[in-house]
Amino acid sequence: MDGTERWEVAPDAGRPEGRVCSHLGLLEQSGAPGAAPSAGCRGCAPHGARWVRLRQCVTCGYVGCCDSSPGRHSYGHHARSGHPVAVSLAPDEDWAWCFPDEVFLVRARPDAADPPTGGARYRWEAPMGTNGADTGGTESVWDYPRPPRTEPDTRHVMVWHAGVPLADSRRCVRVLETSHPPVFYVPRADVRMELLRASQHRSVCEWKGTATYWDLGPELGHPSAARIAWSYEAPLPDYAPIAGHLAFHADRVDTCTVDGERVRAQPGGFYGGWITAGITGPFKGVPGSWGW
């Protein structure tokens, strides 16, 4: 690209209509980069870790992957440098992301009637109800903060598998994070812990600390199910309210409900948010969303 191509805010950028970006000029002045460098993510490579999708800073050329941890990778580079825009280097993605304005940027349409160039590479389809209409909820995940916050929730939460209740609580803690549906953490006293076994698997969140994963044991007379839940046994101070609580993957058990409403799992199979009729997206986990 020669630096003269124009860019615009994607029409369905995951934010309300009318969103603007004050940093479009960066792309138009410098142009988008080409192929991904062989060195890969500068945050992962020194540790021998693998990266999936690379982003390149338009201002300085820094290359980081799509991990949104606040001190690392592409997001971490933005947090340290203040450089606002990164372009996706993934071959199936044709867009840039503006961190401060939280919008996708795409190559400007040559004609208003034409779809944006490469539109299929960034577009998402909003979660729809069974009748094909928008779920019309009252909370947008794009109004949630990052870093995430915790809040108590007194609604009736239940988790079932193989006809047996695994959790039953009216004193959960929700964790709310930008672009993610809420994660419900259930107090240990309200979970059938005798049916679960601590896994050897661990992961680390820079905000919450080290996560322990829980497998379903054989007591139900069914094959064991791996990593159906996770917990932070000793979370970092800001997340003390979820210490020892368990969160369940809705797509790894038979049923999870909130006040009797069956929840849907956050898309992508990696994150564990719960989608109800009161929550609107788009949600991180859909194709092309790893840099959100």
Image (spheres, rainbow, N blue to C red):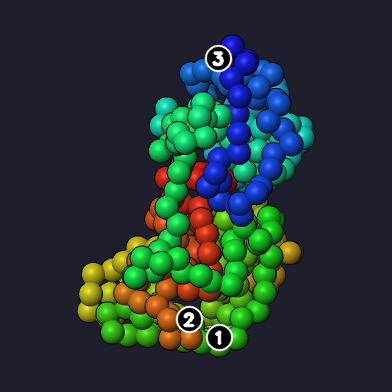
At which x and y percent is residue 205?
60, 53
Q: Which residue is mark 1?
A: 155
Residue 99 placement, left or right of 229: right
Residue nearer the viewer, 161 or 31: 31
Residue nearer the viewer, 86 or 226: 86
At 67% from the left edge and 69% from the top edge, which residue is drawn? 150
Q: Amino acid at mark 1?
A: Arg
Residue 240 visible in the current orientation: yes
At which x and y percent is residue 19?
66, 47
Tell me if residue 129 comes above or below residue 261 in the rendering: above
Q: Which residue is mark 2?
A: 258
The numbered mark, 3 or 2, whose residue comes first in the sequence reads 3
Q: How many marks?
A: 3
What is the quadrant of residue 243 in the picture? bottom right
Mark 1: secondary structure = loop
Numbered mark located on residue 1 in the image? 3
Q: Amino acid at mark 2?
A: Val
Tell me if residue 122 comes above or below residue 267 in the rendering: above
In space, the residues marked 1 and 3 are separated at their CA atoms by 53 Å
In space, the residues marked 3 and 2 are separated at their CA atoms by 50 Å
At 65% from the left edge and 38% from the top edge, which residue is drawn? 98
The answer to whether the residue labelled 1 contacts the one labelled 2, judged by CB atoms less than 8 Å apart, is: yes
- Name the outermost residue toward the top: 2
